[in-house]
Image (tube, coloured by chain):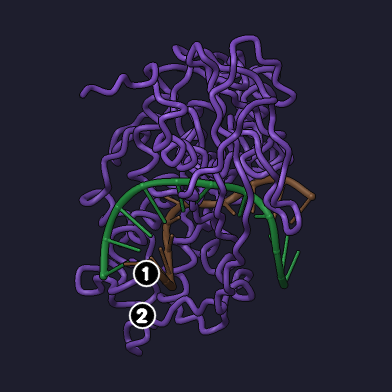
Chain colours: A purple, B green, C brown
Amino acid sequence: MNRPLSDDLLDWYDRHARALPWRVPPGWDIRPDPYGVWLSEVMLQQTTVAAVKGYWERFRTRWPTVEALAAAEDAEVMAEWAGLGYYARARNLLACARAVAARGGFPQTEAELRALPGIGPYTAAAVAAIAFRERAAVVDGNVERVMSRVFDIATPLPAARSEIRARADLLTPTERAGDYAQAVMDLGATICTPRSPACVVCPWREPCLARARGVQAERPVKPAKKVVPQRRGMAYVGRREDGAWLLETRKSERMLGGMLGWPGSAWDRGEEEAPPPAPGDWVALNAEARHGFSHFGLTLRVLVARLPQGTEPQRGQFVPVEAFHPDRLPTAMRRVLEVARTSPLIADSEPIVHET
DNA sequence: TATACGTGGGG
DNA sequence: TCCCCAAGTAT
C-alpha cells in the first residue's frame, strides 16, 4: 500500500522537471538526440549540472554530431574539456565517438552501449532509457541516496549496492523509463538532497521508510573518508623572447593525461625534482602553487626563465603567444601560471623602463 | 573490493 | 580554511 509508485514520481516530474539544455521536457513525444544525451551523461559523471552546461553547449556548437566529434583533433577536444576535470573522460569520449562513427551510429541497447569506451553501467542505462526508451534501471549517486532512504537501507556503501540496484530495478517502469530515470535524479538533486532533504514536499514522503523513522539524514551510510596525502613537485614556466610559452602535452597514462601542462617533475614520492626542460637562467619564485586533487594535495615550486630566441627545448615545445590560452590548461596548471605571472621575467611586455 | 582519477560550489 | 560532495569508469 505504501509502496513507492513510479507513477507518483512521474506525476511530480511532469510538474517539476528541471529544464536542461540536453533534455526533452516531459510530455513532448519526441526523442532526444542520442549524441546530445550521451555527451551530457559523460560530462555529468561526478560533475555538477551547473559546471556542465557551458561545456555541453560549446561542444554541441563546435561539434554538432558524433561524426564531427569523431573527426576532431585530440588536442582540440582536450583543450575544450580543460577545467572540467577527470580527463580520461575526454580521452574516452573521443575514442567512443570514433567507434560510434565507424559503426554508423550509436547502438540502441544497454548491453551494446556498455561495451563502448567511457560508458559504464550508469551511462549505458541512462542513454538506453533516455535516448532509446529501453527499460533500463539507472543507478547513480542520486538513486543510491533515494533508495537508501525510501527503503531505509542501513547497510553501508558500497556493500549496499546490490540491494540498491535490486530495489531500483523493481521500481523502474516499462513505460517512460527515460522520464523515470531523470525523475529520480531530479528528485535526488532538488528534494532528496544529501543534507536537509525537503521531505515535506517529496512525492515519495508517504512510503519513505527512513523519513517515517526519522533517519533520512543518516542515509545512505557511507564509509569513513581517509586523509588525503600531500605531495610536492616543481614546474618550469619558460617564455621565449618573442613571447612563446614552453609547454608539453602530458602522457595519457599520467595525471592530467592528454592535457597541456608546464614541464616539471613527477609528483610521486621521491620524484619532486626534475632537470629544466631547456637551458637557461631558471629562477625559483618564492610563492608556490597549491592545488587540491581528489586524492592528494599538491604543492608545486615554480621556476621561471626568459629564454633566448633559438632555444632548443629538451622537453615540450614553444606555443606562440597568439596560440596560448590559459583556458586550455587544466586548473592545476592555471594555478602555476598565476604564480609565475608574479615574476617580471615572463611579463608580456619588454622590461619596464623606470621613470625618475 | 579498493584505488586512481578533477574541479568548483556550498555550508 | 576546511570538508563535503556531484548524473562514474577503468583497472
Q: Quadrant of the N terminus of chain A?
A: bottom left
Residue A100 in which image quadrant: top right
Q: Quadrant of the C terminus of chain A?
A: top left
Q: Amino acid at mark 1?
A: Pro
The residue depicted at 58 percent of the width and 29 percent of the height is A260
In the picture as drawn, the residue positioned furthest to the front comes out as A356
Residue A262 in which image quadrant: top right
Residue carrying label 2:
A217
The residue depicted at 48 percent of the width and 26 percent of the height is A80
Q: Amino acid at mark 2?
A: Ala
- Residue A92 vs A86, above or below: the answer is above
Chain letter behind tag 2: A
On screen, residue A105 versus residue A170, left or right, reads right
The residue depicted at 44 percent of the width and 41 percent of the height is A339
Q: Position of residue A341 (x, y in %)?
A: 41, 34
Residue carrying label 1:
A194
| Numbered disc 1: secondary structure | loop
Q: Position of residue A98 (x, y in %)?
A: 66, 21
The residue depicted at 53 percent of the width and 64 percent of the height is A170
Neighbourhood count class around disc 1 (C-alpha, 10 Å): few under 14, some 14–19, many 20 upward: some
Q: Position of residue A316 (x, y in %)?
A: 67, 24
On screen, residue A247 versus residue A10, left or right, reads right
Q: Earlier in the sequence, mark 2 or mark 1?
A: 1
- Residue A182 vs A112, above or below: the answer is below
